[in-house]
Image: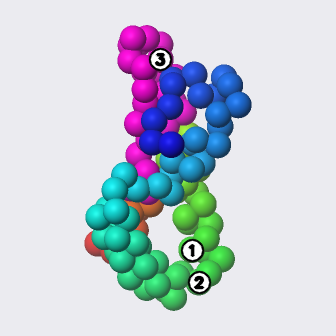
Amino acid sequence: LRGAKPDSTATTELYRFLTGTITFASTGELIFGLILMFNLSKRFEREMGTRKYFIFLFGVAILAIAFQIFIAHLVGVLIPTLATFKYSGPYPTLGALLGLFY
């Protein structure tokens, strides 16, 4: 699930863009990322409220997916020999949460 062909949007593989935003690459990343997300999410959900926090996370996910689709098409056009495209994982969400923290 970590990689896809650049033409993922042309076929029925759109689920890869949705699952690519929630998957980690290894167990160590999973443990560290979940601890970090749990601590930050708990704080910001209390500060922002559940509805605003959900809208924030949903917006970050939509923007990340849009940029991934754009980059997949750009890479497919500019470098057609590149066979796979690596998804960013949950790092846009972690980056947005850390941006709110600082």
Q: Quadrant of residue 55?
A: bottom right
Mark 1 near mark 2, Cβ–Cβ under 8 Å? yes
- Front-most of residues 85 and 71: 85
Q: Position of residue 67 (x, y in %)?
A: 49, 38
Q: Nearer the viewer, mark 1 or mark 3?
A: 3
Q: Which residue corresponds to mark 1? A: 53
Q: CA distance from mark 1 to mark 2?
A: 6 Å
Instruction: State how far apart marks 1 and 3 are (Cα).
Output: 34 Å
**Residue type highlighted by circle 1:** Tyr
Residue under label 2? 49
SS for tag 2? loop
Nearer to us in this view, 20 or 102 = 20
Q: From this view, report whether residue 46 is shown above or below residue 14.
A: below
Residue 74 on image: x %, y %: 46, 21
User: Which of the labelled discs sits on residue 76, or is there none?
Assistant: 3
Magenta highlight range: 68-92
Callout 2 amino acid: Gly
